[in-house]
Amino acid sequence: MLKYKDHTLAAIVSDRHQAAAVFEKYHLDFCCKGKRTLQQACIEKNIPVEPVLEELHQVFEPGFTVEDQLLSTMSVSELTDYIVLKHHVFVKHAMPVIYQHLYRVATKHGDRFPYMQQIFNLFASLQLEMDSHMQRKKLCYFPV
């Protein structure tokens, strides 16, 4: 994990998207200032690099749970709960974060990369469709 100390913030996020949440927590800009190494960014922010590395390790190496391994053995009720509690919660959490990142890039760099506005618009449509899809599935297949 120490190897990430000398990698750029942009390269780390490109390699492992989970790093974005950790960097945001510490206010480490991996977009416009993404060419700095993690060590340089931490020095600039006057924060120790070790806690950041530890949190990166935690998000990169999540525990493997039994239910991930045994989906085929779950009852319909267990599988339903798993889908709603794991996947729907993840999508509901991840979509706004991705939306904000795309919005920031499209508004700050849209003049140099005009296709970013189109990507942002496509994602915004996708987000609306996913929200609608999950709501329909919840009402049809996963009623409370």
Image: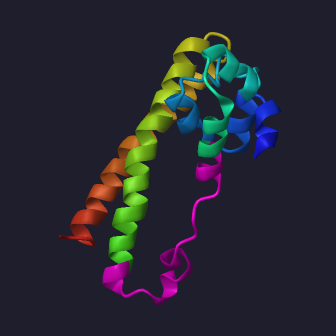
Q: Is residue 132 left or right of residue 41?
A: left
Q: Quadrant of residue 89?
A: bottom left
Instruction: Identify the magenta region.
Output: 56-78
Q: Is residue 112 left or right of residue 72?
A: right
State the predominant SS element of the stretch in magenta. Answer: helix
- Picture quarter with the C terminus: bottom left
Identify which residue is drawn at 77% across, 38% down: 4
Q: Is residue 18 visible?
A: no
Image position of 37 with respect to 33: above or below: below
Instruction: From the top left corner, tell me how far across and down residue 36 is, in percent.
Output: 75, 20
Who's the residue at 46% across and 28% down the image? 100
Q: Residue 143 placed where, x, y %?
A: 20, 70
Q: Is residue 54 above or below residue 133?
A: above
Q: What is the x, y in percent for residue 102?
A: 53, 28
> Residue 33: horizontal and vertical position, in percent?
68, 17
Question: Toward which corner of the image does residue 95 lie, by quadrant?
Answer: top left
The residue at 24%/69% (across/down) is 140
Examine the rendering and report whether any part of residue 77 can be seen: yes
Give the answer, above or below, for where 89 lies relative to 77: above
> Is 72 one of the magenta-colored residues?
yes
Query: In the image, is residue 7 part of the stretch drawn in magenta?
Result: no
In depth, the one of 111 and 46 nearer the eye is 46
Locate residue 48: give its quadrant: top right
Q: Nearer the viewer, residue 86 or 138?
A: 86
